[in-house]
Amino acid sequence: MDELVRAYIKSMRLAPGLNTQRIFAAWDACSGAAPFTLRRFFRSGTLYITVSSSVVRNQLYFQRDLLVEKMNAWLSGDALFTEDNRSVGYIRNLVLK
């Protein structure tokens, strides 16, 4: 069944959109800043996050590298995240606005 779902996702070209949604879910799960998050955008390995509180943004700024590691670890354990997708893969950089 696992292989069938992966084949369906690949054949219907759903992987980039699904991967992006899984990345946003990883942000919510790992950062703890979901209530303060206004906007999310992912492009070319960079996750752009707009946060409503400057205090929260400052605290997250110093934890950027740790957050990227935690989110990538979370994504590697996610069954729906396709690792071999060229357009939307793992997070390499985090930009807080």
Image (cartoon, helix red, strand yellow):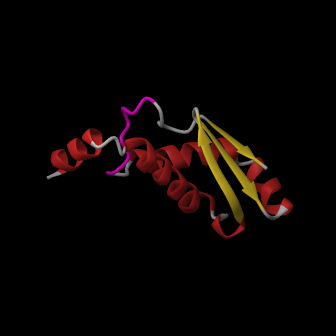
> Compared to 53, does 88 lie above or below?
above
Q: In this view, does 29 lie to the left or right of 82?
A: right
Taking the image as shown, residue 71 lies to the left or right of residue 59, namely left
Residue 95 sits in quarter: top right
Tell me which residue sits at (36%, 41%) in the image: 82
Question: What stretch of residues is rendered in magenta?
Answer: 79-86
Verify whether residue 85 appears in magenta.
yes
Residue ID at (28%, 39%):
10
Residue, far front: 12
Q: Which residue is drawn at 17% across and 44% down?
A: 3
Residue with the most extreme right position: 54
Position of 51 with respect to 19 (left or right) is right
- Give percent across and percent down for residue 7: 21, 42
Q: Is 16 part of what is drawn in magenta?
A: no
Q: Quick check: 63 above or below 55?
A: above
Residue 50 lies, with reference to residue 44, above or below; the image says: below
